[in-house]
């Protein structure tokens, strides 16, 4: 007995396998633009992961925010490749646009919270390129509305594009600017502070030359420093005068960075506006009785060979400030939560960085330093805030501003 099938039935059976294969092929093929958008999301997420620890050092809210964004971007990258849909598309655009908006706020008016609330940050290469990848992600995701774009396949081009994005991300994270950025939790800060005063005490506590609120033990010491100098009796004034003469002679032995480096000194932490660049010999100045001829550090207005000598820094151990210079006006200060790796400062001094965070970057952690005092004894570099002021407003960045990275550093003269 023969079974008779009509022609439409035969055509239907013949079409089903090919239809199933076509559907399967479409489900396993991933478009070039999808790969590129996913790679950009991974790159932005990786940068946010790398920057999160340093932002925790400044503000818990910022650190948590960076981690949340990083996980969202990584998760969306996976969804773009394996679970792409209109909902995923909307989520990618929403998250990327929110990141761009947050970045714009931080660079124009500053966030209303955190250690630098209300301070606008300057654009760095790290955050600038990261926000550019987020903008590109929005554009690519919008392009996927086109079926022609969605169906476009080119494995070779996709591979090159993905590798290029990941290489750029790796270079960003490894760059010195990124290391400073990740060590400090903010981009550079644009402060616009005038040079008329150094540390000041506002309604919410003391601030430094950059307008940042001062935390930790340094806050107590700076508050004491802000008090007016006390008059000196003739004998005390005579002793102080002689001490300052000795200090000035000591400073002028090394008039430039080239001369101090030739003498075996090394810069610690780079140049900071208001505090200069500190060069230390590691041969003394850490202990013993106070001697104006034996400072721990020589201070310069930059780190280039021609940078000029501007002052000295003395250091002493103990639970209380040393006698130091004659009279009551040499206000000594300390720093807390210091994280150093060799001569590099990994986190901003006096921030809420923990020993574990410091160790994770290979740094050495110091809970509280010894006592320090600056002496601005070099002619033409006297501090308008006083010879022993913690900061000297005459020390600016090379561009004439107080704009710094998040470690509090910039390029000196």
Image (spheres, helix red, strand yellow):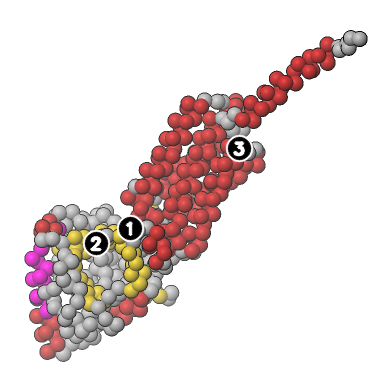
| Residue 244 located within the stretch drawn in magenta | yes
Residue 19 left/right relative to 292: right
Cβ atoms under marks 1 and 2 closer than 8 Å: no
Q: Where does residue 319 sit, x and y in percent of width and height?
A: 29, 82
- Specify the quadrant that holds the C terminus: bottom left
- The mark closer to the camera, 1 or 3, is 3
Say which quarter of the image contains residue 227: bottom left
Label ID, residue 268: 2
In the structure shown, which secondary structural element does the residue marked by tag 3 occupy? helix
In the structure shown, which secondary structural element does the residue marked by tag 1 occupy? loop
Residue 138 left/right relative to 359: right
Q: Within 10 angstroms of label 3, few (less than 14), some, or many (20 or more) residues?
A: some
Q: Earlier in the sequence, mark 2 or mark 3?
A: 3
**Mark-to-mark CA distance, 1 and 3:** 43 Å
Label ID, residue 339: none
Q: Where does residue 65 sit, x and y in percent of width and height?
A: 52, 57
Q: Where does residue 328 sit, x and y in percent of width and height?
A: 22, 85
Residue 388 visible: no
Magenta-colored span: 243-257
The residue located at (35%, 59%) in the rendering is 362
The residue located at (8%, 71%) in the rendering is 249
Q: Where does residue 254 sit, x and y in percent of width and height?
A: 10, 63
Q: Which residue is mark 1?
A: 404
């Amino acid at each position: 007995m023969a079974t008779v099938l009509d022609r439409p039935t035969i055509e239907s059976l013949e079409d089903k396998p090919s239809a199933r294969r076509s559907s399967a092929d479409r489900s396993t093929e991933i478009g070039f633009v999808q790969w590129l958008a996913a790679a950009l999301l991974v790159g932005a997420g990786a940068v946010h992961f790398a920057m999160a620890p340093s932002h925790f050092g400044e503000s818990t809210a910022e650190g948590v925010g960076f981690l949340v964004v990083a996980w969202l971007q990584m998760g969306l990258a996976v969804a773009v490749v394996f679970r792409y849909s209109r909902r995923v598309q909307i989520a990618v655009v929403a998250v990327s646009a929110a990141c761009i908006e947050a970045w714009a706020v931080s660079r124009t008016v500053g966030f209303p919270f955190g250690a630098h609330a209300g301070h606008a940050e300057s654009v760095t290469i790290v955050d600038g390129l990261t926000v550019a990848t987020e903008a590109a992600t929005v554009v690519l995701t919008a392009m996927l509305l086109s079926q022609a774009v969605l169906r476009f396949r080119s494995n070779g081009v996709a591979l090159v594009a993905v590798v290029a994005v990941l290489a750029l991300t790796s270079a960003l994270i490894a760059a010195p600017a990124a290391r400073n950025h990740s060590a400090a939790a903010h981009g550079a800060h644009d402060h616009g502070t005038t040079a008329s005063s150094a540390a000041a005490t506002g309604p919410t506590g003391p601030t430094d030359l950059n307008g940042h609120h001062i935390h930790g033990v340094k806050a107590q010491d700076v508050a004491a420093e802000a008090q007016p100098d006390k008059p000196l009796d003739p004998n005390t004034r005579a002793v102080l005068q002689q001490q300052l003469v000795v200090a000035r002679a000591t400073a002028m032995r090394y008039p430039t960075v080239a001369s101090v480096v030739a003498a075996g000194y090394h810069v610690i932490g780079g140049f900071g506006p208001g505090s200069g660049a500190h060069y230390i010999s590691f041969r003394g100045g850490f202990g013993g009785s106070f001697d104006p001829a034996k400072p721990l550090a020589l201070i310069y207005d930059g780190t280039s060979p021609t940078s000029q000598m501007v002052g000295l820094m003395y250091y002493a151990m103990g639970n209380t400030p040393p006698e130091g210079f004659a009279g009551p006006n040499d206000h000594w200060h300390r720093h807390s939560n210091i994280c150093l790796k060799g001569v590099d400062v990994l986190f901003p001094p006096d921030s809420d960085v923990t020993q574990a965070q410091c160790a994770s970057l290979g740094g050495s952690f110091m809970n509280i330093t010894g006592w320090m005092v600056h002496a601005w004894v070099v002619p033409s570099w006297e501090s308008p805030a006083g010879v022993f002021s913690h900061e000297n407003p005459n020390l600016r960045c090379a561009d004439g501003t107080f704009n710094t990275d998040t470690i509090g550093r910039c390029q000196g003269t």
